[in-house]
Amino acid sequence: QLVESGGGLVQPGGSLRLSCSASGGTLAVLAIGWFRQAPGKEREGVSCISTSGGSTKYATSVKGRFTISRDNAENTVYLQMNSLKPEDTAVYYCAAIDIPGETMGTLSVWEYHIWGQGTQVTVSS
């Protein structure tokens, strides 16, 4: 099971760092993705990172503002979000692709097998 943390209320232009950890397991062997879902909208891919951390991808809307990273020793994947905008407001989820070996991430929700419960991010003045 995945557990997200770090969400909250922030002003436009501010920053937040989200964390994704595993309850009772390890993230070190899994490719991880971050997704978000705003009210009335479909869940969309934000960023993903390969098993080793050597490959990352970003949605166009967050490129240059968000950074994904992983610390396998800490069993945690992070999403650093800078220059936040009101349109970044959503519930953010982390998810894992449960396939053995080095796995590339993807921004497609359909490729992921394990999901967290989400953390709310609200960007508002």
Image (spheres, rainbow, N blue to C red):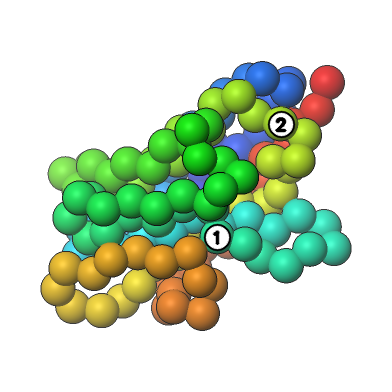
Q: Which residue is mark 2?
A: 85
Q: Label 1, secondary structure: give it.
A: strand
Q: Which mark sits nearer the N-terminus, 1 or 2? A: 1
Q: Position of residue 50 (x, y in %)?
A: 27, 59
Q: Quarter of the image containing the C terminus?
A: top right
Q: Label 2, secondary structure: give it.
A: loop
Say whether marks 1 and 2 touch (CB < 8 Å): no
Q: Is residue 56 left or right of residue 17?
A: left
Q: Is residue 100 left or right of residue 65?
A: left
Residue at 26% from the left image edge and 53% from the top image edge: 55
Q: Amino acid at mark 2?
A: Lys
Q: Which residue is mark 1?
A: 45
Q: Quarter of the image containing the N terminus?
A: bottom left
Q: Quadrant of residue 38?
A: bottom right
Asked whether 109 or 94 is in front, the reply is 109
Bin the neighbour count of mark 1 within 10 Å (Cα to Cα): few under 14, some 14-19, many 20 and up: many
Q: Is residue 79 left or right of residue 41?
A: left
Residue at 46% from the left image edge and 49% from the top image edge: 58
Residue at 32% from the left image edge and 41% from the top image edge: 69
Q: Amino acid at mark 1?
A: Gly
Asked whether 58 or 24 is in front, the reply is 58
